[in-house]
Image (cartoon, rainbow, N blue to C red):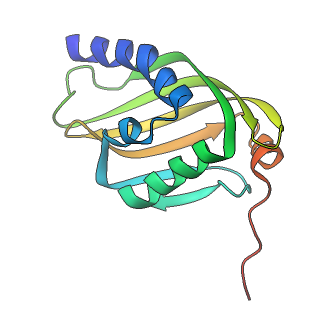
């Protein structure tokens, strides 16, 4: 239970700061090599990204496209308060983000991210936006598939 409290406090205190600083290395430290990131919607940033290298490229592209990111962690819940650092755990994070792109487009989005932790590493993350259409406003639509 103490580990769960530490994870909650660390995430609330530090994750927003790492995103604001656009610290790709720090964000990626917690990912497992075979991690999976899933983003909803039909934007250029939407899709399923498998493996640490693909996730790193996604995070770098997100950070590079934004002039400012204000990520606010609202609430955190864990399914297993005794399984940090070993075993598996699910972490649900309610958040709000304000993003301004380098072109000046701005959005406010709210959602929930579900982290799957295995052996103390982030094995999967799925984002659920309350309104995923806002992603197209700031990132543009996903390019059409080549035929």
Foreground residue, 100 or 85? 100
The percent position of residue 144, horizontal first and vertical second, equals: 77, 73
77 sits to left or right of 83: right
The percent position of residue 63, horizontal first and vertical second, equals: 58, 42
The percent position of residue 76, horizontal first and vertical second, equals: 46, 19
Foreground residue, 142 or 90? 142
Q: Is residue 64 above or below residue 78?
A: below
The percent position of residue 100, horizontal first and vertical second, equals: 75, 33
3 sits to left or right of 94: left
Quarter residue 53 falls in: bottom left
For the question of whether residue 71 can be seen, the reply is: yes
Q: Looking at the image, which residue is at 22% across and 17% down? A: 3
84 sits to left or right of 25: left
Q: Looking at the image, which residue is at 75% across and 68% down? A: 143
Q: Is residue 129 above or below residue 37?
A: above
Q: Looking at the image, which residue is at 52% across and 47% down? A: 59
Q: Looking at the image, which residue is at 57% across and 41% down? A: 127
- The C terminus appears in which quarter of the rendering? bottom right
Quarter residue 111 falls in: top right
């Amino acid at each position: 239970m103490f580990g769960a409290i530490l994870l909650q406090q660390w995430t609330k205190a530090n994750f927003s700061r790492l995103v604001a600083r656009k610290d790709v290395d720090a964000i990626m430290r917690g990912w497992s090599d075979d991690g999976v990131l899933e983003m909803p919607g039909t934007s250029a940033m939407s899709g399923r990204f498998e493996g640490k290298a693909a996730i790193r490229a996604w995070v770098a592209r997100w950070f590079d496209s934004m002039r400012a990111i204000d990520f606010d962690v609202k609430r955190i819940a864990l399914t297993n308060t005794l399984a940090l650092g070993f075993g598996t755990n699910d972490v649900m994070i309610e958040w709000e983000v304000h993003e301004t792109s380098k072109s000046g487009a701005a959005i406010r989005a709210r959602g929930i991210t579900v982290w799957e932790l295995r052996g103390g590493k982030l094995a999967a993350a799925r984002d659920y936006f309350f309104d995923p259409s806002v992603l197209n406003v700031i990132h543009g639509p996903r390019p059409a598939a080549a035929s």
